Image (cartoon, rainbow, N blue to C red):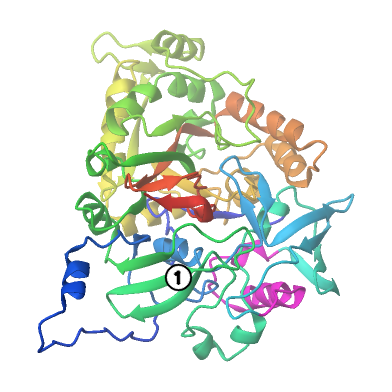
Amino acid sequence: MMKGYKILVATLMALVIFTGCGVQDMALQDELQENEPSEAVALQTDEKKPPENKMIIAMDVPTTLNPLYNTQENVEQALYLMFSPLINIEENGTISANVAHSWMVNENNTAVTLTLDNTIKWHDGKALTTDDVIFSIEQIQAISESPYKQTVENISSVEKIDDKTLKIFYKQSFSGMLQTLFFPIIPKHVYDVPESSAMTINPIGSGPFKFKSMTPLKHMQLEANQDYFRGAPQIEAVEVSIIPDEESSLHAFKQDLIDVVYTDITEWGKYANDKSSKIHELTSNIYEFMGLNFNKAVFQNANVRKALMHGLDREEMIYLYYLDHAAVTDTPISPSSYLYDKGLPTQGYDKEKSKLLLTQEGYERDGKTGLMTKNEIPLAFTLIINAENWDRVKIAGEIKKMYKEIGVEVTVQEFDRATYLSKIETRQYDAFLGGWQLSYALDLSFAFHSSQAISGQNYVNYKDSKMDELLQQSFLATESNILESYAALQQFFAEQNPYISLYFKKKVLLTKGKITGDIKPTPLNVFSNVELWAIE
């Protein structure tokens, strides 16, 4: 089975954060004039200058402006202003045309033929061709730590048909094959140089904005690409301010120093408290859950797991601690995904049902302690969390309180990140709060297939032949049966609860009121239709 496409969230494992140097620009200074200005000049200087048609955003200090090497998340978003992905991925996980204008998948999902938009030019005026796409794929394959590495792992070969058509062959069939085509394309005639040079080249892409200049540690200046294949941007310029971290960017937004910020912090509302700010909220692919160690006999009982699921008021958790900026889920399939089974009922909060399920499994309430016991052994476990994740600290306290009401005792233990990860990897825990940042090229085998329980990332050691079969069917599904395959997988997941699913976190794009137009960000590229944005 193909290795799962996934990135483990930093608060669980090491979240790979998507992330330049350039030439310093010259600051122009007005010379002092000894003579008094003429009357005409004086009249001109008294008039108010028209507002600049410029948008200001922020990014971290970049280590490179080559999008195939960059691993900083907000630098990546800035790079999408200059580089165009091969295809786009929408919020619901479906794909849409971009550099690739159209595509055709063969019958057994092992090859795709792509036709490129024939109007695309690089910022230096040269035409974008299949040679550039093939070069980009080969570069990603060669780079040891490219953030797009997993998108090309299943590619066996690429065939050039003509300057605008190519065919990609895959090692094996995979239902998420088209979603793996989301990666930026770079020009071969510019970047076909030694790695040290490729890391420091001033960006030349095919995106809506062109690189103009860079003042190290201060800002990067971009200008509109009048030849952009999706139409010239209405905004004439973008200034990318160098700001050290996300919190500083949020403060800069609040102080009107930047116009746009993208974040998933829970309390983003306090940075958008002026009425002029606009809010564009998106469901992310960050899935939060409680993992149970299946090496513990008590957690091997499906009814006990179901009782634990019904014992949590997840809606209340989201209201109290996420300010409603999350979406309850029973499975690792996002409620916003086109794969989501809308007919699957949510396992709601029901204390009495939890108690009944435990009673049916032989548990009785102890009159002295109030705990559910079986063979004089109370139903109790330790829940570990990473102490630096304040959201999880609060959620763990709420879980402890809610489970006490159904007679389950939880002891919460906080550890530093390294210790927390070590305990999970070595299976030295009862339960843990964790999260996955899942790929849109979805394959859940990495977390739930029996083959991954010993040395893989199935950290809960869940093993079930039926689950293995459903994972395989979903992995191999074609367009004709993919919805049916994933519906069956979700239904079985909701029956078995190999994780106690909590929610998918939401992200938000905050824009100042002066940014107008048809603003439609996507989770992977918030500037996906920036050519339609405008400034009042």
The residue shown at (37%, 39%) is 279
Vertical position of residue 177 compared to residue 500: above or below: below
Residue 151 among magenta residues: yes
Q: Magenta span covers which residues?
A: 126-153
The residue shown at (66%, 73%) is 121
Frontmost residue, 536 versus 386: 536
The residue shown at (31%, 31%) is 323
Q: Is 222 positioned to the left or the right of 1 in the image? A: left
Please state the horizontal and vertical placement of residue 352, each as a whole percent of the image. 41, 8
Vertical position of residue 523 compared to residue 183: above or below: above
Residue 28 appears in the picture as rendered: yes
The residue shown at (40%, 48%) is 428
Vertical position of residue 403 compared to residue 322: above or below: above
Q: Is 398 positioned to the left or the right of 3 in the image? A: left
Residue 432 among magenta residues: no
Q: Is 104 positioned to the left or the right of 507 in the image? A: right
Please state the horizontal and vertical placement of residue 292, each as a whole percent of the image. 46, 37
Frontmost residue, 181 versus 345: 181
Task: Name the image quarter holding residue 396.
Answer: top left
How busy is the neighbourhood of tag 1: few (under 14 within 10 Å), some, or many (20 plus)?
Answer: some
Please state the horizontal and vertical placement of residue 287, each as a whole percent of the image. 48, 41
Report which residue position mark 1 lands on.
223
Number of disc labels: 1
Mark 1 is on which residue type?
Answer: Glu
Mark 1: which secondary structure? Answer: strand
Q: Residue furthest right?
A: 107
